[in-house]
Amino acid sequence: MSGCGCGQSPISIGGCQPAKPACPPVSCPDTKPREHCETTPLRDSAPYRVPATAISTDPSPYYTIANTHAALDPVVAQTILNSGTGTFPADDGTHNGQHTWLAGIVHIDPASLRGNPTSVTISASVHVRNDGGSTACRLYGRFALWNGTTPIRTDLLGPPDLPAGDDDNGVIPPTTVSLADVLAGKIVVELNLETGNDDTCRVGPKQWTVDSFVLTVEASAPGCGRTFLRTTCRNCDGAVTCTTDTLDGSTPYAAVPPVIPVTSCGDGCAPVRPPCLSTDRGNAITRGSDGCLYVPDTPALDPSPCNAARNTTGGLLVPRIDVTGIAPGGNSGSERSVDIDVTGTPGCPERWEIGARLTPVSAFLNAERQHADLLARAGTDVPIPESDIVLPEAGVYHIDSDVRYALGSATGGSGYIIGWLRDETTDTLLTSFTQIAAINAARQEQQGGTTHIMTEYTVASGPRTVRLHLMFVLTGGNISSAEAGGTDSNGATRMRFLKVRD
């Protein structure tokens, strides 16, 4: 193109046309016109972005999954739809298969439309994280697009059985919908996540962090796409020697047909409002004295070493840094043994204050139940599900249990009660058999008390369920009562754990 002999015109937006540059003289026979190039501003039909928002609405019309439902707090839902961060709280464990839902009505500004499109294309994405304390069951949610009460897209969230601490991304691919339905408020984005217990997968409740919601709406109309420059060069005979399309006179561009001269476009492709230029000092777009907007070949980047943005082949890249931890003055968390506090202060280079505190996960449980009748099941393993404790994550745990018991004979007899702890998730024995109580009486005798079982246990991943097991063994005579594992007037069976290291 540089050999064609003409300079380039600036980019023209909204019908503004700068004057064409003069062509330099070329040596030609007197009977031939001189070689020359001319640049014409054109507009193609590429899709253009339409500003759009999603407004939180009642999600109940979109409940289609069986079992129980819960609507996310509307304030939290709107925060997420505004591309902020929100939490889907875990259910209290009483609902089988409960899902929590949010929904947002898609809104666009009609004044931002160019031409007369009859439809628009909608796409969306969102990031979710399973905060625990359970693995998600199978395909655990849905990211969907609705028209009224009719689902247009119902994309299930996976991968299946997402562990606690893992992330996933929901995507609604580009989907064409009626512009009239969008303007009528009928197009809705919906997200639901499994927050309750699921007996099918035998998993418990779980909490989710949701962020990075992005809603994209595009429209298109003939000749209402992107403005570009077409340079045509002719030789001394008037034949075309080259035709080049560029965005700004140097950046190549592949135009989307049909292509229309800017002079023919009129106001039909222009938004009602004129383009507004930001007054930020970093804004690289300028308005010339001729009224046209001028855009540099590439974004102007501040050369300061503090600037982390850089140009790549795919466009401008701005690194994202997520700093996590508990805010100053907050409570201890349940995800790690050490919580990190990070506080940023203004300045360049950015200064950070980092602090840490030990916050090991722990739990305490009273078995609020009556004693299990071990005598009726003598010689049999008797599990005590009311004693269940859940180790939420990988690490080394100190686990101990106070086992309350009652053992007696009305006429004399002998026998003993033993107990042990077992990992129900992996069917692993934590402790060897511990004697809880023993009796060897020639006549009437009644016993009652508490015995301690203690161990240290290492798990590679969580969650893990640990349960107390009991057994009575009769060795002679007549035993009238053998009970354990519950609560009575003198004490209770208790379970405790404390994470001691990662």
Image: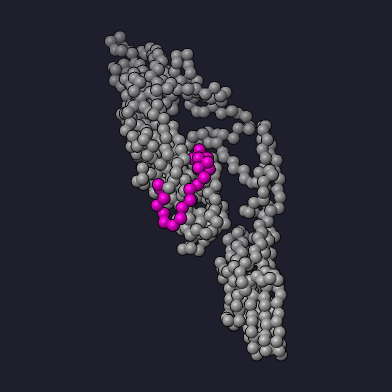
Q: Is residue 433 magenta?
A: no
Which of the image's four quarters has the C terminus?
Answer: bottom right
Visible residue check, residue 37: no
> Which residue is pictured at 36% across the width and 42% down the height?
147
Q: Which residues are magenta?
A: 61-83
Find residue 436 and report its image quarter.
bottom right
Looking at the image, is 472 positioned above or below residue 38?
A: below
Find residue 177 and report its image quarter.
top left
Q: Residue extending furthest top?
A: 30
Q: Depth check: 125 or 349 in front?
A: 125
Visible residue check, residue 104: yes
Determine whether, in the image, residue 57 is placed left or right of residue 426. Answer: left
> Which residue is pictured at 67% across the width and 89% down the height?
411
Q: Is residue 71 magenta?
A: yes
Q: Position of residue 221 (x, y in %)?
A: 33, 30
Q: Depth check: 212 or 259 in front?
A: 212
> Which residue is pictured at 59% across the width and 41% down the height?
321
- Scheme by which the image is coloured: one colour
Q: Depth check: 265 or 197 in front?
A: 197
Looking at the image, is 217 positioned above or below residue 410?
A: above
Which of the image's four quarters has the N terminus?
Answer: top left
> Which residue is pictured at 71% across the width and 90% down the height?
442
Q: Position of residue 394 (x, y in %)?
A: 62, 60
Q: Position of residue 103 (x, y in %)?
A: 45, 44
Q: Position of residue 134 (x, y in %)?
A: 55, 58
Determine whether, in the image, residue 431 is placed left or right of residue 54. Answer: right
